[in-house]
Amino acid sequence: YVTANGSKSDRVFAPYSVFKGKAALSVDPFLPTFSKLTSGGVRVDRRGGIMMTFWPAHFALSATEVGSLISLGAKESCEFFHDPSMKSSNAGQVRKSLAVKPQSDGSGYMFSLSVVNNILKSNDRFSIPITAAEFAVLRTAFSFALPHIMGWDRITNQPQTSKDEN
Amino acid sequence: YVTANGSKSDRVFAPYSVFKGKAALSVDPFLPTFSKLTSGGVRVDRRGGIMMTFWPAHFALSATEVGSLISLGAKESCEFFHDPSMKSSNAGQVRKSLAVKPQSDGSGYMFSLSVVNNILKSNDRFSIPITAAEFAVLRTAFSFALPHIMGWDRITNQPQTSKDEN
Amino acid sequence: YVTANGSKSDRVFAPYSVFKGKAALSVDPFLPTFSKLTSGGVRVDRRGGIMMTFWPAHFALSATEVGSLISLGAKESCEFFHDPSMKSSNAGQVRKSLAVKPQSDGSGYMFSLSVVNNILKSNDRFSIPITAAEFAVLRTAFSFALPHIMGWDRITNQPQTSKDEN
Amino acid sequence: YVTANGSKSDRVFAPYSVFKGKAALSVDPFLPTFSKLTSGGVRVDRRGGIMMTFWPAHFALSATEVGSLISLGAKESCEFFHDPSMKSSNAGQVRKSLAVKPQSDGSGYMFSLSVVNNILKSNDRFSIPITAAEFAVLRTAFSFALPHIMGWDRITNQPQTSKDEN
């Protein structure tokens, strides 16, 4: 993973992938980065998240969006909007939205990623049905990953083996 | 964190923060301290908890208060009362209470911290709405943190790398 | 904890205790022991559990009894029977039972331990009310502890730091 | 466990076993294998799972099948079909199916493994009743194991003690 001093080491690739015909969804958590404080402690710098990949498009879920997904009721839906160019000169030019909607027959959810790019004049939509069993894997794995992407797994009583990991 | 012998080392800062207009709530677990026993084992000394910060006021949730929050039903409310000067000569002079109440439209909860200080003749109230998704993050992260603030994460079959961590 | 070769080292004491008047309940997980196999692996030897202490009486919950408690519905009750002298010449002389019953007002559960000792001609009963918040702590901490008392926390992808921990 | 370079080391045996008369069911997670990437990271190679053993027959649950079991409602059933010779010349000759059905009295589930072997002209069926408490152990332990069999427990902020574990 990317450590606080910028080196990449031992990045672990363990995506959970779902294939349905030509569509595929792959999910993979990414960790926060930490900064060393002059006081001797460490502080979360850039938050982690969960990367959802509908090849070739990506959508990075924040902790709160993960909270929304893991608490989604059987008949509830949710939608998240991202502007990948936010705070840059291209702000508002690319609009991504991820929608999760229950199937009418109760068999699971439809995940749809829409990417509208005003610069490239493109408008793409990626959809994949996720069964209730696959959604249970996502909910359990996301619940496991949530404290890690928040950095709370560093707050532990386990004896540390090294003082200078960052 | 604060170790049993009093030194502070590698304190990790990973607050989960929610900002709503001028209001902000930040939550952060803190660990128990351990004492070494002459028998060779270790014992939890001072319990850990979860610090809720409504700048500049703080409220430290105990394990049982965390249990109350993570089992809160969608239409239930709860309230905790603390006397930060308990067992000192100022007992009863400062009264803090944290109330968590469901929003009437089902969109989440209102968290309110009230601090009545008879010494300073002050009466402050801090309130922030927490969405259902943010509450799901709190519930999942608090459930993860609970065994850690109780010290149960030290009771593990993982091989220990060092015998003298305290 | 007690390691496979019988030495006690770094036993961690982190009981969760509830005090109600003169009654007290303390709960504390204990770990399984492992044996080294000639093949190079390790096998769980004696199972772990969760020790419930109603001073001075003890009741050690097995994994399946823990499963019963953590899945207990709001209006359900359960009862476990133990014979501490099972398979010895005193079998049947001491009978322990732990009953968990919901309070009629929905405020939590009553935990009662009954110990009938035909040798000492004694018949003791220890009872303590457990609030819904305290039960939520037990359910969350027991769910955390369950894989540890089963030994499943040893089955991990984390790099091991030592080959000879037993 | 089996490491990426093929050596077996420190395999941990910690099955959860249920005995009912002559029938027995034993469950045990197995870990994924990892490959080292030339980029310096590691990638999940062969997925892990949970091995269900009805002596002498085995059935290895995938992550998605585990998701199906842990989200099973009290009155729901599920069934999984495996062809152990899939993609070999014996494809279709052996058919295994695991069925999980709720007991009509609500006391738990019946787990049944059926193995039809056209080569040996055999047709075996293994069934064992699982109580609600035992199912709660399975659900909790499977939920704990799921991120491990997916390899997500490797994605952690904990300082690594060794760079060359594979």
Image (cartoon, coloured by chain):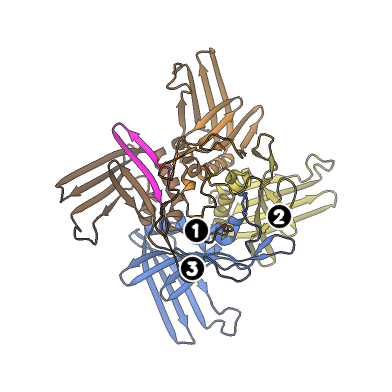
Chain colours: A yellow, B orange, C brown, D blue
Q: Which residues are magenta?
A: C13-30
Q: Quadrant of the N terminus of chain B?
A: top right
Instruction: Please determine whether, in this image, residue C6 is positioned above or below residue B154.
Output: below
Report x, y in % for residue D86.
Answer: 58, 78
> Which one is in front, C32 or C16?
C32
Q: Check residue D20 for magenta coloring.
A: no
Residue bearing the label numbered 3: D51
Query: Do labels 2 and 3 touch, CB within 8 Å?
Result: no
Which kind of residue does numbered mark 3 sit on?
Answer: Met
Q: Quadrant of residue D91?
A: bottom right
Residue sitting at x 51%, y 62% = D66
Dot in front, 2 or 3: 2
Which kind of residue does numbered mark 1 sit on?
Answer: Glu
Report x, y in % for residue A30.
Answer: 67, 51
- Label 3: element kind: strand
Residue bearing the label numbered 2: A9
Q: Label 2: chain?
A: A
- Label 1: element kind: loop
Dot in front, 2 or 1: 1
Q: Distance between the Cα atoms at labels 2 and 3?
A: 32 Å
Residue bearing the label numbered 1: C165
Which kind of residue does numbered mark 2 sit on?
Answer: Ser
